[in-house]
Amino acid sequence: MIKSTLIVLKIFTFLLSVTSYDTKIPNGLTLKMIHRDSPESPIYRANLTDKERMKKYIKMSSAKVKSLGIMLVKNKSFKSLKPNRAMRPTITEHFESYMVQAGIGTFGNDNPISKIYYLYLDTGNDLIWTQCKAAGDNHFNQVDPLFPESESSSYHPISCDNCPPNSKCEAGVCIVNKKYHDNARVSAIAATEVFTFATEGGHSQSLPNIIFGCGINMLDFPEGKNVHNKISGAIGLGYGFYGLMEQTQMIFRGTFSYCLQPAIREGYRSLATPMYLRFGNDILPGPISGLMTMMATSIFRNRHLTQYYLNVEDMSVGSRKLNLNPHFFTIKDDGTGGFVIDTGIAMTYIIREAYHVVMLAIKDFMKVNNYNVREMKTPELGYELCYRRYKNPKHVNLPTVTFHFSNNADYIIPTTSTFYMSKTSNDHRDMYCMNFFPDDHRSYLGALHQVHKRIVYDTRNSVLYFAEVNCFEVN
């Protein structure tokens, strides 16, 4: 207990020594979120159809979840998983659903400007980093010039007498090494810098003295295989010392929020509708201001992992409560299990034992409430369960699915999201595919099941708030 208290005190002292926020900095921030399939995205592919996009989401989500599971299994002795080894999957195309544009540094004297870069939003990791021009042997390909840190008047490498946690002194500067489990790794100079973001109304807002990794050696990152790549790094929103939420506790009080719009079907309307990531006082009327009733449940950290976990007590299909075994969603001694909320995974995954119960309940619902559909022997697009409407009426009754979180917080997946609705490939009949998948190691609430919900993270008080809203109209 004494040892852990000393560690916390040391970290707090370090933050005070390298971080001094101007009291004039607003206690709120609003960033424009860019979906990977928005025309504003640097990786947008206009030629993809809805079905092709969904197939891609399923394939990439499956690869990421499978690889995350392999990482957990490789660390059967969970205590051996080091804090600087991040949970990053082996995939040929990085799947973080959202990104932001960030201005980094201060250049010029009379009218100082920053250099603009695209950075992934990563709710599963904590490190903020970008590739730098500093001496190094390995950088992955990016279209924009590398960040010229030596030319920025606000760039300050952290001295060796004040190295932050999980870093070490090399050649007079602190080096932080992040090794991902697919062997992609970044070696970066731990430094402080000004990050500037475009906000609503054409304004900008700066956050000074942000601790970030100035990348000097990056190995085995798949992003560099794309000759048109414009992604230069990431902003970590997960738990951990280097995360944006930990660093801005005194400004934003550990709170951030988003309201996701669908990227499939009606989502094409959303491509022209701004979507925002809000911090602190900029969060729209909700629990922070007391103007809106929202569900509240606990979020927590699984030891030193950086993801956000939720307590699932049961599930329902339609009005039928499933009375699932509570151990299905508990965290095991080896670190597997649990239920993670993650915007970087498109689809929702349920631990296999619970998934079978959910699937059978959905099959029962479809059989009892419909006589115009049949289960497809060969589901399409990588789905596990699909139905084909073979006769009239055109209307098909679909169930809601509810996650019963702790504190009596019912998280309802509406009928429009429990199934993906499209046409069969061979005869173009109406097709309905169940938007849930099984996993052997852990459960995940994916981005597609977070749409049209105002979701607020209060990391300081370990609470997640959520409410049903139309994210096209209120964002």
Image (cartoon, rainbow, N blue to C red):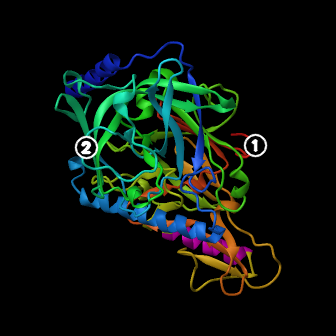
**What residue range appears in magenta?**
356-369
The residue that disc 2 covers is: 136
The residue that disc 1 covers is: 473
Q: Residue at 68% across / 52% down in the picture?
A: 271
**Where in the figure is residue 336, as x and y percent of width and height?**
34, 56
Under circle 2, the secondary element is: loop
Crowding at dot 2, Cα within 10 Å, few <14 / some 14-19 / many 20+, comes out as few
208, above or below 415, in the image: above
Q: Residue at 39% across / 44% down in the picture?
A: 125
**Where in the figure is residue 152, as x and y percent of width and height?**
39, 27
Give the left or right position of residue 161, taking residue 118 as reference: left
Give the left or right position of residue 39, taking residue 251 as reference: right
Q: Main secondary structure of the magenta part?
A: helix
Q: Quadrant of the C terminus?
A: top right
Q: Is residue 285 in view?
A: no
- In this orientation, which residue lies closer to the viewer: 199 or 428? 199
Residue 114, disc: none
Q: Quadrant of residue 376?
A: bottom right
Q: Is residue 207 in view?
A: yes
Is tag 2's residue or tag 1's residue first in the polypeptide sequence?
2
* Residue 132 falls within the magenta-colored stretch: no
Q: CA distance from mark 2 to mark 1?
A: 47 Å
> For the residues carrying marks 2 and 1, which lies nearer the camera in this image?
2
Q: Amino acid at mark 1?
A: Glu
Q: Amino acid at mark 2?
A: Gly
**Where in the figure is residue 261, as x and y percent of width and height?**
66, 50
Q: Residue at 34% across / 44% down in the picture?
A: 305
- In this orientation, which residue lies closer to the viewer: 326 or 449? 449
